[in-house]
Image (cartoon, rainbow, N blue to C red):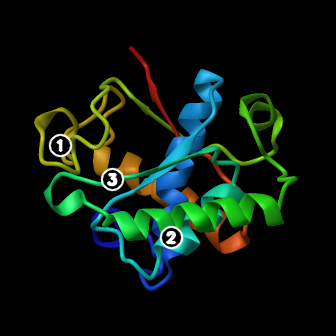
């Protein structure tokens, strides 16, 4: 993200990437008036998984999934049990969370940077698909790389200021 979009998200803090991922999950939940949750995959650093679950809970996640099969996505069953126990203990230790449930999420005060696009393929430019090639121009003559740079610069600003944020990818039709 830093190289592609010119932002300065410190890569050594798992909260930065989690902020982006959780921001999109919360933004989608807010837009759809639904609750949200997270999944832990086998590729997640084992040392980060407990913190990621606790942090997601603190941000209002209500669903926690653990992948227990399919090749590299697998989290061994014993770890699934341990992570589920961490989630259970966290919910008992912190029963009242500022943002819990879709109605509370809708009413919460957080910044919500929006990425407007005429295309609905999330991450298409990132994944190498043509729909959002970073060098393509939008209808205003601005390269998608600049649009994304502005978006990630706002994310960086929120992270540095400690401002809660949700992210929303909107389709302009």
Image quadrant in which you'd find residue 160: bottom right
State which tag comes first along the sequence, 2 or 1.
Answer: 2
In front here: 36 or 157? Answer: 36
Report the residue marked by disc 2: 82
Mark 3 or mark 2, whichever is nearer to me = 2
Q: Pick the quarter of the image with the N terminus.
A: bottom left
Q: Which mark is on residue 133?
A: 1
Disc ID at residue 79:
none
Residue 157 seen by the camera: no
From the viewer's perspective, is 91 left or right of 20?
right
Q: Residues within 10 Å of mark 2 (few under 14, many from 20)?
A: few
Q: Indicate the secondary structure of the residue bearing disc 1.
A: loop
Q: Hey, which residue is sitting farthest right in the picture?
A: 96
x and y percent of residue 162 in the render? 72, 69
**Dot 3 alpha-carbon crowd within 10 angstroms: few under 14, some 14 to 19, many 20 or more:** some
Q: Quadrant of residue 4?
A: bottom left
Residue 86 lies left or right of residue 117; in this view the side is: right
Q: Secondary structure at mark 3?
A: loop
Of the two numbered discs 2 and 1 in the rendering, the one whose residue sits closer to the viewer? 2
- Confirm or deny contact between disc 3 and disc 2 (CB under 8 A): no
- Label 1, residues with CA under 10 Å away: few <14, some 14-19, many ≥20: some
Q: Residue at point 50% right, 44% down? A: 24
- Residue beneath disc 3: 67
Q: Where is residue 130? Give x, y as percent.
A: 12, 36
Rendered view: 60 above or below 169: below
Location of residue 78 in the rendering, given as x and y in whole percent from the top left corner: 39, 69
Query: What's the CA distance linking mark 2 and mark 1?
Result: 41 Å
Give the mark, 3 or 2, whose residue is nearer the N terminus: 3
Q: Residue at x 50, y 70 (%)?
A: 82
For marks 3 and 1 on the same chain, the one whose residue lies earlier in the sequence? 3
Q: CA distance from mark 3 to mark 1?
A: 31 Å
Depth check: give the residue in front, 84 or 48. 84
């Amino acid at each position: 993200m830093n190289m592609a979009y010119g932002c300065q998200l410190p890569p050594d803090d798992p909260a930065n990437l989690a902020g982006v991922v959780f921001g999109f999950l919360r933004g989608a939940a807010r837009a759809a008036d639904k609750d949200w949750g997270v999944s832990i995959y086998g590729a997640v650093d084992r040392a980060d998984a407990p913190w990621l679950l606790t942090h997601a809970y603190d941000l209002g996640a209500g669903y926690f999934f653990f992948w227990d099969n399919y090749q590299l996505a697998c989290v061994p069953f014993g770890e699934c049990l341990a992570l589920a126990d961490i989630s259970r203990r966290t919910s008992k230790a912190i029963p009242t969370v500022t943002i819990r449930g879709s109605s509370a999420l809708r009413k919460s005060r957080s910044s919500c940077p929006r990425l407007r696009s005429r295309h609905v393929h999330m991450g298409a430019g990132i994944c190498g698909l043509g729909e959002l090639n970073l060098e393509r121009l939008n209808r205003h003559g601005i390269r998608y790389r600049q649009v994304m740079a502005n978006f990630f610069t706002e994310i960086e600003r929120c992270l540095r200021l400690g401002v809660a944020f949700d992210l929303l990818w909107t389709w302009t039709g």
